[in-house]
Amino acid sequence: MWIPVAGLPPRLTLSSLVGAGRFCILGAGAARRKPLQARNRRGLSDSAPQLCPDPDFRKSPSRVKSKSTLGFNRYITSRRLAETMAQIVCGKQKTPPHLFLECNPGPGILTQALLEVGAKVVALESDKTFIPHLESLGKNLEGKLQVIHCDFFKMDPKGTGAIKPPAMASQDLFQNLGIEAVPWKAGIPLKIIGTFPIRSERKILWKLIHNLYSCTSIYKYGRIELNVLIYEKEFQKLMADPRNPDLYQVLSVLWQVACKIEVLHKELLEPSQEKLYFIQITPCRNLFTENLTPMNYQVFIHMVKHCFGKRKCRLLDHLRSLTPLDAKDILRQIGKKKEDKVTNLYPQDFKQLFETIQSSKDCAYRWLYDDRLEGRYND
Amino acid sequence: MAVLWGRGVARLGRGLWPSGRPGLPTEEGTLGGLCGPRRSSSASPREQDQDRRKDWGHVELLEVLQARVRQLQAESVSEVTVNRVDVARLPEHGSGDGGRQPPAEVQTGAEGATPALFVHWAKRLDKDKRIQQMRRQRLEKQLQRRAQNPGFSSEPKRLHVEPRLLSTQLTTCLQGCRREVPERPWEEQLARVLQEAPRKLSLDKKQGQQLKTRFANRQQKILAFLKCCLLTGHQSLAHHLLVTHHSQGRSQKLLTLDMYNTVMLGWARQGAFRELLYVFIMVKDAGFSPDLASYAAALQCMGRQDQDVGTIKRCLEQMSQEGLKLQEVFTAVPLCEEERAAVLKAVLKAKPTFKLPERPPSPVNTSKLLRDVYAKDGPVSYPKLHLPLETLWDLFKQQLRVELASSVRLKSVERPVAESKEVKRARETLKALRLQWEKALWEALQETKERLEREAHTGLPSMFPFLCLLDEQEMVQMLLQALQALPTQGESFMGLARDLGARTFGRHEVRRQQLGGQVEALKRRYRQYLHLLASDSKVPEPCLPRQYWEALGALEPPQEQPWPLPVQVELGRLLAEILVQATKMPSNLAKPRDCSRLVPLLYHVYSFRNVYQIGFLKPHPAYVQLLATAAEPTLTFEAVDVPMLCPPLPWTSPHSGAFLLSPTKLMRAVDGTMHHQRLLENCPPAALHGALDTLTQLGNCAWRVNGRVLDLVLELFQDKGCPKLGVPAPPSEVAPPHEAPLPSSTGLVCKAELRRELARSLKEAREMHSLRADALYRLSLAEHLRDCVFWLPHNMDFRGRTYPCPPHFNHLGNDLARALLEFAQGRPLGPHGLDWLKIHVVNLTGLKKREPLQVRRAFAEEVMSDILDSADNPMTGRKWWMGSEEPWQTLACCMEIAKAVRTSDPATYVSHFPVHQDGSCNGLQHYAALGRDSVGAASVNLEPSDVPQDVYSDVAAQVEVFRRQDARRGSRVAQVLEGFVTRKVVKQTVMTVVYGVTRFGGRLQIEKRLRELSDFPQEFLWEASQYLVRQVFRSLQEMFSGSRAIQHWLTESARLISHMGSAVEWVTPLGIPIIQPYHQEIKIKQGGGGLQSISYSINADSSLKPNKLKQRNGFPPNFIHSLDSTHMMLTALHCYREGLTFVSVHDCFWTHAADVPIMNQVCREQFVRLHSQPILQDLSSFLVSRFCSSSRPQKLSQRLEDSKLRETLLAVPKPGAFDLERVKRSTFFFS
């Protein structure tokens, strides 16, 4: 019953999955606790879906519901898209070869494209099924490809207790790869490339932004650049500001303050007419200042959350529940008017607001925020 | 000019005139002078008019002031505005009956008094010019503001009196009577109205669950509003609201017969016949047919009004035509003495021969299990308290004082801080601030009241009457108390709101009883009751406290029901908002005089938890600092949180018992759960006797504090604490998080590390703090009660398990709490008492668990020198007691033994020490007895044996057998587990299996245990735990086959029942009705506005769909708990009959050392008797009659479900062959 994915010609493999829309591959029995667990996979469409030449695929039992917590993974199956992406991220000149961590490469089409343009790739694959195939890709490349069983999006799980694979501690991973931490102000140590899993984009964005502001997990190693494919809807929210107030939200502010976000490429998905954006997220060199540090970033996040809790309210009213300082005075200092609403503030304004309060001198008590009232990302 | 105007301005007057507050006695004198003559000239003063009249007084005073204002030639006072205050045009229809309206001559009289008063005021004014000036300015400002506000100057609505009807037929009849001359025809009218057929009710449309709940909530709110209006004397307002709603088609659907009856009752109490009739017309118009309560109200009114015979006769005729019995008016409708007399007067007029129905003799419980308890013959030696009558009477008076004051202030046992200058200043600042807040709160309360009254006048059921329940001063004090109790890190807004609502209700209940003269009645009755308990008085024949109490006379009408949750929360929210708005503090506390800027004291902040956003109220950090500096040495508790100083009232019904005045629930439940109460009320009174008597008896046990242990604990507590012994350390012992400014060169990653460390230490400090606070409360209460005798009133949870009501200091707490308590009543040890003490001390140490009793006793004698050393030098000696499992109790027991052995004859030593007997794995004992499992019964000590059996070891051994088999067969996991299957690994899972732990939870428990083993290969954790939990379940299946079958049967039945859409209900063998309060959650959102919108989820309302999973998983453990509580109750009642002191902590029974053998015997006998009943058969037949429909349902699917359920319920598992009688001879059943 086990399907030798590795044996398929790469061009045909996964694009064929698209024809069915949803596809099912049997898990490798030996390694799993539930030997016959099957998972749904959803591939990204190629512009011209092809039928699967391998009869095995049609025989395979289908439609067993996945129990994965993070929902479906998406895999790049279009050779053309993979090549475009690889070219964009590597640039024209081939020196020096960048180090890429690729999240969930699946069939390895992008991996191959990256290797072809001369990059060094570490493939972090959460599904053991794909691993033999991926390893076969790097056979003749003198260690340019390294495959690790790891789920990038479950890196450094919360809570105590043993970390069960495919989750992993970033410390172990980076140590194994021999990557050293570089100071924040220095350059970019490595790049991540991949696709956000469907349905949990927001969850992952939240997790990453917390890690970024607190300089933990992968961001302990410096300003790591993300190159990811993201759906248009989520992208618009991420980039929203007072000009499109309906989409403007906490995540937009936090990400735009922290990072430079650039669109590298747009791709239209054929059957659903959905747009995918290939974006580059680079943490800002000057994100941390004297007033905004990994020590007090939580207050900043809380402040933004508080403001967007009642987004139609005036900023003045929010300030009164955020700080015991004189709200009007603060507004004057950041040059805002009394009747300004939350949605009138640009992301950078929030940072300025925060720093103004944080640096205020007249009172010992600057914030009403209390660590103890928060629930989730505390430690 | 308008009511609103009048009132609005009147408030200004009040603002100008600080009556009732200390410091301005002269002005108070003025008030008296003003009101005095008015009160005497008022034709028929009624209490509820006082508010209104006060307003009148204010208006007049205002006129005087306005004159003053004018005379002082204020530049910008709006003359027009002032002139518009027109006394003569105050409402004429503000109330229904003439008595409520100030008579005309009073008005003129008041005007006549104006000049004199003016002179009086002018004098005052000269003296106090500066203050007056300020006030004048304020008045001007406010007057101007009012004048500018257009909403204010508009003509306000008058209160409606006459109904607007929907049915034309009734309308004509109404008009008919309006045209005629008043007085006579009203009576005729009633009869005619009564005969009118009610309008057809339109059938309710189908509504969604959400809508339905919202609709029900609105109804509850209206009903609560009307009831509350009655209590505060705002009948006309209630009537107005009813009429407003009635006249609108849509809101009329909200009205229920209960609401009409409530308003009618209000009028009946006043004897206002015309208004009563109006309501009657509305009832007919709305399509209801009047019920007993309506007729009772009508009769009461007629009794008061002295109506003529004809009307009453017609009324009674109509009643009998509708099939209502006159007798039932007196039995089924709750009436107080005076109301009953009025009704009787009316009835006697029409039927001179009518006789009040005889009170039926209180029924006696006929349950088989309780027959012995209530048997009149046979030896009875109910225990008496050791205190004489007069002492008890004094104690009662003390407790009454405490409850009337509603709160208790006591000294904290925290080590007092040195009285430095700083501390003194902080305390002074606090005092000054509190005075300011008191004033501010009072004003804010006034303002809110007025706003809400206006709202009520527009026909909204506002919170106005609820705010009138308590007088302002008390309300303000309550708010200040809440402020003081606010935790420094803030409290959730919702929590505070609930709390404030509940407190208001509690205080109101106390006030109501005080005003209604019930306190006096209680005093008389309690004094008589004490004759039963006191050591120096005799009663003619022995009886139980409840029986005696009932025999003392008719029961008082039931107490008021707690308000529905929406009302409680709404009121609490309002009060919390007042608190936030009114309290302010100077921005710079160090120099309060210099800085004029006031900042709020409380801030409304949000906390984010996942997707939830929770509103919190958080005090200003400077205030927190101030409180910490001041370190005030007092703690304030609500009266119900402190143990009682006299024997609690016996439980006589689901709503009367325990505390003297404060309302207490017989069955504790989440706020807003009504169905337990409903079930309890609907079951026959005798069925509850077992539970009521047990709770009474448990509460009647007198306690005292073990002073020597307390001294030792306090010493540790005030020093550095000792977490190992359960005495939490003070916060100063935790390493304080370093907040020193970091050098700017600190790296980012380093900062991140620091932050995490900071968070960790904060978390630690927080946990310490809460532990510390808990201990502080407990020890402070213990210190407070050190030289007293006190009582712990009890109630029960929904399964019948009993708990003491006072939460902080009781015998259910940890080792430390238990060690602090001993029986106030002593008993000589007798021949075997000392042996039991010795066995008990060994039991407490946790050593010799698997040895017979003789060995334990011998061991105690062996270590006697250690025991005596512990007792003599607890802190300096060899500290043997500290190594025990329950150190403090061990120490207390050591001291008791030392005292006993040092008396010349230990048998005569009077011991106060409670000795415990524990059931071994009590849940499994009940399962094993139900299923008659021989193997299982032996392993949980139902079978007599020389040494105690240990079920955990037995299960471990069984698992080991299976493991070896598997290992031989080549299972890798089984081989890895070699040598790791121990008692410790399986213990928790076996213990919790009774309480419904699943494989999932069991696996986690075992995984945790395995992880603790350092030499276990960690990579096998998952597989090994998975394997083990399966084996544990298999072993249990093998050993307790009958029990497991029963567990499955219960689960399956619950699944099917909840699948049919009902919550599982059953009746315990003692007759307590039980319902599982697990329902699907539903979110209730209460209107926005104010600080935040409030939403809360309800999952305990029986009208909701059941939560199938919880119903299913909860049934087996809850059923077993209901059995163990039954066993406890039976033991308690029989012990009481034997004259024993008995208390329990669920499956751990306490009594004096001398009485242990008797208690043990009773306990075993009752266990056998309980399980000799066909418990499962009874359950099965109850469930069939309750949940299987008697008629065949229409739909096929329903029919299938029904038959499946019936089939399952009837398939009661067959019991095994264990002979239950053997339990009687088992030593270690409870040991």
Image (cartoon, rainbow, N blue to C red):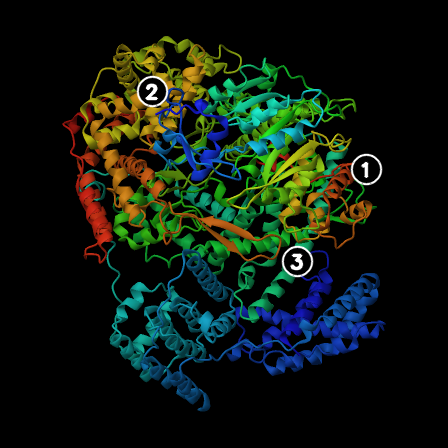
Q: Mark 1 points at which residue?
A: A361
Q: To which chain does the residue with label 3 belong?
A: B
The reply to whether dot 1 and dot 3 touch (C-beta < 8 Å) is: no
Q: Do marks 1 and 3 both belong to one polypeptide chain?
A: no
Would you call the spot at circle 2 few (<14 residues within 10 Å), some (14-19), or many (20 or more)? many
Q: Mark 2 points at which residue?
A: B1028
Between circles 3 and 2, the one closer to the viewer is 2
Between circles 1 and 3, the one closer to the viewer is 1
Spatial CA span between label 1 and label 3: 34 Å
Q: Name the residue under label 3.
A: B444
Between circles 2 and 1, the one closer to the viewer is 2
Spatial CA span between label 3 and label 2: 64 Å
Q: Is mark 3 on a helix, strand or loop?
A: helix
Task: Name the residue nearer the viewer: B863 or B1065.
Answer: B1065
Identify the residue shown where x is 36% and y is 8%: B862
Q: Do marks 3 and 2 both belong to one polypeptide chain?
A: yes
Residue A253 in view (yes/no): yes
The reply to whether dot 3 and dot 2 touch (C-beta < 8 Å) is: no
Task: Name the residue nearer the viewer: B558 or A281.
Answer: A281
Residue type at mark 1 is: Lys
Spatial CA span between label 2 and label 1: 62 Å
Locate the C terminus of chain B by quadrant: top left
Question: How far from the left and from the top, in percent, is residue A221?
Answer: 67, 22
Question: How far from the left and from the top, in percent, is residue B131?
Answer: 80, 61
Compared with residue B339, is residue B536 higher up or lower down, i.e. above or below? above
